[in-house]
Image (tube, rainbow, N blue to C red):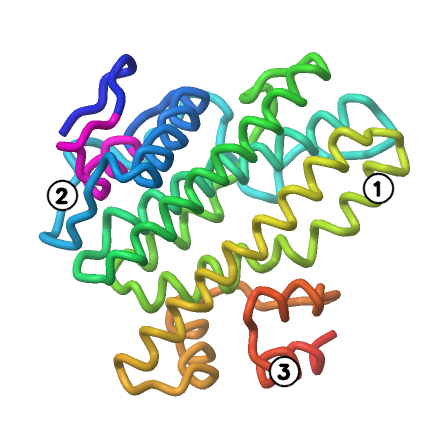
Amino acid sequence: MKLEPEERPTQDTEVRQAALALLCWCDPVEKARKVGMLHAALHAGKVNIIPGPDLLPSGMIPGRPVRPELVSPLLLERRSMRTARGRAALIHALAHIEFNAINLALDAVWRFAGMPIQYYADWLRVAAEEAHHFTLLNEHLQSLGYQYGDFTGHDSLWEMVAKTSDDVLARMALVPRTLEARGLDASPPLRAKLAQVGDMQAAAILDILLHDEIGHVAIGNHWYAWLCDQRGLEPVATYAQLTQQYSAPKLRGPFNFPARKAAGFSDTELALLEQHS
């Protein structure tokens, strides 16, 4: 199934195939808009979810614009809050994260066949909320006189998506529960810095992001626990093994314990994090 810009999802649209088609799109603004349309169509009962069969992409994934240039995280432009350009670079970095988050959620929808229907609905909801986040940040970036692509970006988030493409358990463990959960920790201090320099619009956007990201991490926690139960695995020990197997980044504090608890991390997991904080 190919989605054209003028098309709207219909009763014949299948969500996993549509998610794969949208993942291949390069225009970030159009991708965000169409993801929102697909989610609204699912919510209205106008499209279908078929858990199987396995799907194969017909093009390069993920679809990306030519810019921003992707570089090592060590080579990213410094984001000093003392300058207007520095603040714009920070907003650009956040928009880049949210664009990649759209892609990772779409990938979770199409890639893993045979999961419960609610799994696909959950991850399409995540994709739609990430699309909304990107739109808010991109519009704010434009209000500052810059465009998405004016600064460099990095590819760390997608690199872990690619590494965990062989196993949905590893994906749930190491993308939402590890990389996205780091956003729960980073959001409050960033919000405080933006408010301190008077960018209250950006601060308000970060409030939305933190609220929604708690839900996204909770979805990852739910499906990770479900998969561990299905496979007869102990969640904490399995997570430790997966972080080593896939060379996941080590977790470093400070941690946002209230947000992590709200996102469904167990008391045992929080106690282990506290030992590192």
Toward the viewer: 96 or 11? 11
What is the distance, in whole Å, between disc 2 and disc 1 at their CAs? Answer: 44 Å
What stretch of residues is rendered in magenta?
Answer: 9-23
Three-letter code, disc 1 = Lys
Image quarter of the N terminus: top left
Image quarter of the C terminus: bottom right
Query: Residue at 39% across / 70% down in the picture?
Result: 224
Toward the viewer: 57 or 80? 57
Query: Residue at 88% across / 30% down in the picture?
Result: 198
What is the distance, in whole Å, between disc 1 and disc 3 at their CAs? Answer: 29 Å
Q: Earlier in the sequence, mark 2 or mark 1?
A: 2
Query: Residue at 62% across / 37% down in the picture?
Result: 94
What is the distance, in whole Å, between disc 2 and disc 3 at their CAs? Answer: 39 Å
Q: Earlier in the sequence, mark 1 or mark 3?
A: 1
The reply to whether discs 2 and 1 touch (Cβ–Cβ < 8 Å) is no
Query: Residue at 54% across / 41% down in the picture?
Result: 72
Q: Quadrant of residue 20?
A: top left
Magenta part mainly helix, strand or loop?
helix
The reply to whether discs 1 and 3 touch (Cβ–Cβ < 8 Å) is no
How packed mark 1 is, by other alpha carbons closer than 10 Å (few <14, some 14-19, many 20 or more), is some
How packed mark 3 is, by other alpha carbons closer than 10 Å (few <14, some 14-19, many 20 or more), is few
Label 3 belongs to which residue? 272
Label 2 belongs to which residue? 56
**Spot occupied by residue 82 in the image (x, y as percentages of width and height):** 88, 30
**Magenta span has 16?**
yes
Label 1 belongs to which residue? 193
Q: Is residue 149 above or below residue 188?
A: above
**Spot occupied by residue 271 in the image (x, y as percentages of width and height):** 66, 83
Q: Which mark is residue 93?
A: none
Q: Secondary structure at mark 3?
A: helix
The reply to whether discs 2 and 3 touch (Cβ–Cβ < 8 Å) is no
